[in-house]
């Protein structure tokens, strides 16, 4: 599984630690920015980079992780793209549910609201929970992709 990760200045420190953890855990991770701390950067740029990388990947199970202060802005920006199902997650239960029920392919994390000691287990839960593919879940995802 290929993981594309991005953050603005508010999420930069958490993203850096998360990338180190994911690399040690054996995941293939690609940093989509910002690659250096810039207090003047804007989150939409990195949401676009990650969303486009997930959609354009040859890996059928490519995933994205976005980190900003609240996670909200990244989630809003990423969900502008057809085929992206970005979810704001702050705990393990939400991580499991958004994968199981929604087949989330982009995880949005709130750097200001999440305990850094919990982030690895939240991300592992999200990465390792399979989509249940119940007919109602599949139908709902198809409906999302038909929205204009």
Image: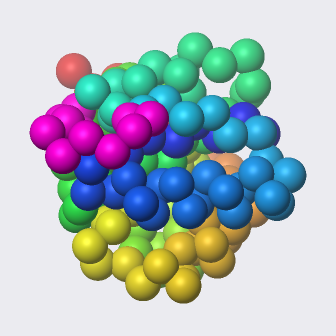
Residue 76 seen: no
| Residue 7 visible from this viewpoint | yes
Figure quadrant of the N terminus: top right
Left or right: 71 in relation to 89: left
The structure residue drawn at horizontal position 57% and vertical position 49%, both measured from the top left corner, is 103
For this view, does 41 lie left or right of residue 25? left
Q: Who is closer to the viewer here, 38 or 72?
A: 38
Viewer-side residue, 53 vs 35: 35
Q: Is residue 81 magenta?
A: no
82 relative to 87, above or below:
above
Q: Position of residue 23 (x, y in %)?
A: 76, 51
Q: Is residue 14 left or right of residue 133?
A: left
Residues in magenta, as a range: 34-44
Q: Does the magenta stretch mainly form a helix, a strand or a loop?
A: loop
Q: Whole-percent x and y of residue 9? A: 27, 49
**Which residue does the image show at 73% across and 27% down from the upper left?**
60
Among the 4 quarters of the image, the one containing residue 17: bottom right
């Amino acid at each position: 599984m290929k993981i594309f990760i991005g953050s603005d200045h508010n999420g930069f420190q958490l993203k850096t630690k998360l990338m180190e953890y994911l690399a040690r855990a054996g995941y293939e991770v690609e940093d989509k920015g910002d690659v250096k701390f810039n207090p003047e950067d804007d989150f939409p740029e990195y949401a676009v980079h990650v969303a486009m990388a997930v959609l354009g990947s040859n890996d059928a199970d490519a995933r994205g992780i976005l980190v900003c202060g609240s996670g909200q802005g990244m989630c809003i920006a990423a969900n502008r793209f057809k085929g992206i199902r970005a979810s704001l997650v702050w705990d393990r239960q939400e991580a499991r549910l958004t994968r199981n029920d929604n087949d989330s392919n982009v995880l949005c994390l709130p750097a200001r609201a999440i305990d850094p000691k919990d982030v690895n287990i939240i991300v592992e839960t999200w990465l390792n929970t399979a989509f249940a593919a119940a007919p109602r879940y599949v139908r709902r995802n198809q409906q999302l992709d038909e929205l204009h």
